[in-house]
Amino acid sequence: DSGVTQTPKHLITATGQRVTLRCSPRSGDLSVYWYQQSLDQGLQFLIQYYNGEERAKGNILERFSAQQFPDLHSELNLSSLELGDSALYFCASSPSSQGAEKLFFGSGTQLSVL
Amino acid sequence: DAKTTQPNSMESNEEEPVHLPCNHSTISGTDYIHWYRQLPSQGPEYVIHGLTSNVNNRMASLAIAEDRKSSTLILHRATLRDAAVYYCILRAYSGGSNYKLTFGKGTLLTVNP
């Protein structure tokens, strides 16, 4: 158990809908990272937050947004969903965002868009 | 972003050592070399990391070339539980005090009984 909690584990929805994925980082960790994993693209970095502020952006679509709340949990919002958004979404956390730090990953949310 | 190159797949026998190579010829002086692995149906799991010197921990050893353009993850005695996708990643400085972690395709390690 990494200490990172993601909910829900599975989500099935339809095209055009909006969903919210939730992540609770390890106790004390200030940084939260979101990754998307699909069969053809591998693990893609989406976005990183540190203590409530956006720190880095990767290949995140404009239809997607995220935030980190004062209690440090984070939410990833996916809207106007398309079939291609079906993927595993992972959240990870680390104490800060230093180069020598390791990331702890949650077990992911499997999103299926039908 | 600095890139890494790994073999798509490797095979090993149980209880034998495994050497997983990684090339990172465009590495910069501030990039850390990280290794993660992903077991089936699980999130990635940290294995080891280093900057310039070789590193050992209970899971593995990391051998870093003197010019830092390549590294090798060493599993001393592979077990069936080590079958996973192994990712070699450069944790690259991205401004302020921030370091990004960008995954590549990884190496699928198969361990034969």
Image (spheres, rainbow, N blue to C red):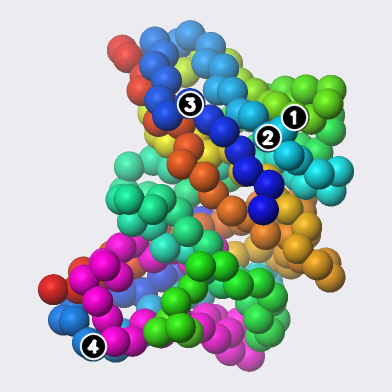
For the C terminus of chain A, which image quadrant?
bottom left
Q: Residues within 10 Å of mark 3 (few under 14, many from 20)?
A: some
Q: CA distance from mark 1 to mark 3?
A: 16 Å
- Label whose residue precedes the other's in the sequence (1 or 3): 3
Q: Tell me the subunit letter for badge 2.
A: B
Q: CA distance from mark 4 to mark 2?
A: 41 Å
Front position in the image: A81 or A110 = A81
Which dot, 4 or 2, sits closer to the camera?
2
Q: Which residue is mark 2?
A: B24
Residue name at image x 59 percent, y 23 percent: B21
Which label sits on residue A17? Answer: 4
Q: Which residues are magenta?
A: A66-92
Q: Secondary structure at mark 1?
A: loop
Q: CA distance from mark 3 to mark 4?
A: 39 Å
**Image marks 2 and 1: residues in contact by CB distance under 8 Å:** yes
**Image marks 1 and 4: residues in contact by CB distance under 8 Å:** no
Q: Amino acid at mark 2?
A: His
Q: Which residue is mark 1?
A: B69
Residue A88 drawn in magenta: yes
Say if A30 sits above or below B48 in the image: below
Is residue A94 visible in the rendered image? The answer is yes
